[in-house]
Image (tube, rainbow, N blue to C red):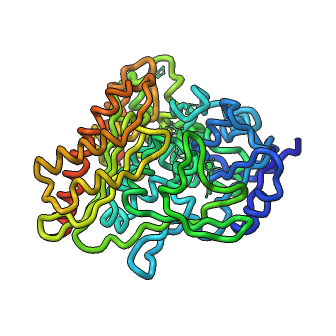
Amino acid sequence: MSKIHVTTTVNGDPVEFLADPRDTLLDCLRDQLGLTGTKEGCGTGDCGACSVTVDGVLVCSCLVLGAEAQGKQIGTVEGIANGSELHPLQRKFIEHAALQCGFCTPGILVAAKALLEQNPDPTETEVRYWLAGNLCRCTGYDKIIRAVLDAGAEMRGAN
Amino acid sequence: MRFHTPKTFEAAVAIAAAASGQTRFLAGGTDVLVQMRAAMVMPDDLIDLKHIPGVKDIARTADGGWQIGIAVSGAELGRHAGIGADWPGVVEGMQLVGSTQVQGRATLVGNLCNGSPAADSVPAMVAAGARLSVIGPQGSRDVAVEDIPAGPGRTTLKPGEVVTAVTLPPRGQNGGDAYLRFIPRTEMDIAVVGVAVNLRLEGDKITEARIALGAVAPKILLVPQAAQAIIGSTLDDAAMDALSAAAVAASTPISDKRGTAAFRKDIVGVLVKRAARIAYERAKGAAK
Ligand SMILES: Cc1cc2nc3c(=O)[nH]c(=O)nc-3n(C[C@H](O)[C@H](O)[C@H](O)COP(=O)(O)OP(=O)(O)OC[C@H]3O[C@@H](n4cnc5c(N)ncnc54)[C@H](O)[C@@H]3O)c2cc1C
Ligand code: FES
Ligand code: FES
């Protein structure tokens, strides 16, 4: 089966890879590019562990083909911190103990960052609905919601 | 699997017409990729429609309706103030599809052509009188949305036919629409019952109505008897009872893990009244 040559941008860096036409963007990020921060929970769009942005739009990378990434701007959890300096969301997740096993965390960070970019001052209800497609089997969600609200408050203060 | 990125609908049709095995079009992929993953469907040819110019556009039609490109996502539809003002029921149906992540990709036409009897945007499109532009090996045609579903996972589109746009009619004066679904939770679930109502008023009286039901039959139904039950009324108690009875009578649901047939019949009778009330209030609001 012939492979497709894909040129794209991940977290601002130009990259290229060869994708089987059936490979998802999730497969390509993890197996071709070694970016294993993006997790596979279900592979069918239900859990959100694979959340990334494509041209700024939050999507499940398990429901995007690698070939569709051609010419796009991809954002993953690896792009959230600024070098060794954690993003406010990352610091607040640690402060609020908003993770246990951590498997859902990369997807939730990517999703929460996308929310705060388009709505810097969300209500608790808005955060809960926005993150409804990100499942967490450990925390019971409450600490996650508080961490996101707190990060939003800090980021508003900082601006 | 061969992956194609045609730049015109004619080229997409030519690829589909020449294909001998399984063919799928790729819009948002939120059904196609799930089916590939589950090995339910492994297309031999997958035709990505998103490289065709104009597929992300929303435009006013000459008569005051809306033409919606086939790759417009649920999130993009939700952000469009004009369509939200004219057809809130269609927008709320589409916005119920999946999570934020799914909304970033899922489309109206994908929801329709996947053929699920529970597809959330379809009853509202049917009630609105939405139409599709279709092009195929035999040329192009214009078809009503209600003529597309043929049963679970099946449509009346012929091999090689592709939808090129969805058109919502002009809203006109004193009209309102609404979509409601019942699910056991608040997000991320498949409709147990879905109901869409679209109506128009003259004063307090309903002069036109279209009512569509989802998840209560092998395909989404347009139910003229339910519309007849409220046309000429002011949505008084007698009309509401007749509406409810007509919706229940038209439903032939199955029992599955989401609910029994008897439960679905009960729910459709209740939801149809609530949706009619919302559509009526919206029409009244629009009349002010
Ligand atoms: C986690 C999750 C939750 C979901 N929740 C819901 C829900 O609550 N309610 C609901 O109704 N659905 C739900 N869905 C199903 C799905 O998201 C919707 O049906 C969606 O609207 C499909 O659109 P798409 O653009 O992704 O379609 P695709 O997957 O791209 O295509 C679906 C089908 O339509 C055909 N098709 C696409 N475009 C065209 C065209 N222009 N012409 C002809 N055929 C075409 C394809 O060949 C394919 O058979 C959910 C899916 C997931 C993964
Ligand atoms: S792995 Fe993509 S949503 Fe679960
Ligand atoms: S911390 Fe374990 S799944 Fe969320």
Q: Residue at x 76, y 57 (%)?
A: B16
Q: Name which residue lies at 22% across and 69% down.
A: B174
Residue B215 image point, x, y percent? 42, 38
Is residue A159 in sight in this rendering? no
Residue B238 relative to residue A11: left or right:
left
Quarter of the view holding residue B182:
top left
Quadrant location of the N terminus of chain A in the rendered image: top right
Q: Nearer the viewer, residue A13 or B287?
A: B287
Where B254 falls versus B121 (above or below)?
Answer: above
- Asked whether B210 or B271 is in front, the reply is B210
Residue A48 image offset from top left, x and y in percent: 51, 33
Please provide percent x and percent y for residue B81: 35, 65
* Residue at 42% over, 57% down: B125
* Residue B35, horizontal then vertical, whole percent: 64, 36
Q: How many marks?
A: 0
Say left or right for B5 vs B182: right
- In the figure, residue A30 lies in which quadrant? top right
- Judged left or right of residue A85, residue B285 is left
Judge whether A21 appears above or below B253 on screen. below
Residue B245 to residue A7: above or below: above
Kindly identify the residue that appears in the image at 41 percent across and 33 percent down: B253
Q: Is residue B97 visible?
A: yes
Spot the residue most to the bottom.
Answer: B62
